[in-house]
Amino acid sequence: MRRVQPSLSLLAEVAMPRYKRAFSLTEMILVVLFIGIFAAISIPRLNFAIISKSKVGYAAQKIVTDLRRTRMLAISEAATNTTGYELRMVSGTPYSSYQIKNRDGNTVVDTLTIDSAVSCSGDNKFRFGPLGNLVNGSGDELVISAEGKTITISLETATGMVKCVEN
């Protein structure tokens, strides 16, 4: 009986499994390098105008809320304060901040800032009487804009109702 000797290729298959269980260091470095190159190309092309547009909406909502707050203060304190409250824009156009003031004692209730990426222009005083209406000498419109997005805030003189419209 003759004995068969195993071939070297059969021994190599038995000794070394066919499937790799990990990536080599070279493969990992190449993948990280390609990801870095793609990121370096794509990040400068991102449109950051979307962020500025969302800041316009946020600034408009903040001002609308504070106009309504000023009106509510004038109505709620009508029994003791017959002159009302006002929201006054601070600094020149474009405005950088605004104050809510008690017109009876001319005291500042609150001071708020407007994001520097947003341009705010228009009337600078919004005076509310004890009935919530706009009094004489009061403005009735503000325009907030940035990166091609514009929002107009307008007030109804007779009722003091605040309306916000995107243009």
Image (spheres, grey):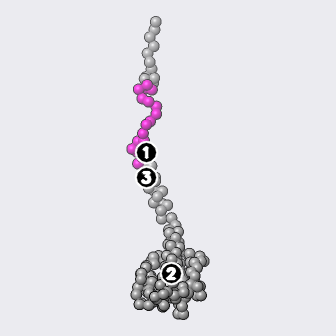
Tag 3: residue type?
A: Leu
Residue tagged 1:
27
| 159, 81: nearer the viewer | 81
Q: Tell me which label, 1 or 3, sits earlier in the chain.
A: 1
Query: From mark 1 to mark 3, how far is it between C-alphas?
Result: 10 Å
Residue 87 visible in this rendered orientation of the protein:
no
Residue tagged 3:
33
- State the SS at label 2: helix
Tag 1: residue type?
A: Glu
**Label drawn at residue 161:** none
Tell me if residue 24 is in the magenta stretch: yes
Q: Does 25 appear above or below 18?
A: below
10 Å crowding of disc 3: few (<14), some (14-19), many (20+): few
Query: From mark 3 to mark 2, how far is it between C-alphas?
Result: 59 Å
Q: Does 142 appear above or below 32?
A: below
- State the SS at label 1: helix
Q: Tell me which label, 3 or 2, sits earlier in the chain.
A: 3
User: In which quadrant of the rendered view does residue 92 lie?
Assistant: bottom left
User: In which quadrant of the rendered view does residue 163 lie?
Assistant: bottom right
The C terminus: image quadrant = bottom right
In the orientation shown, which residue stands out farthest toward the front? 79
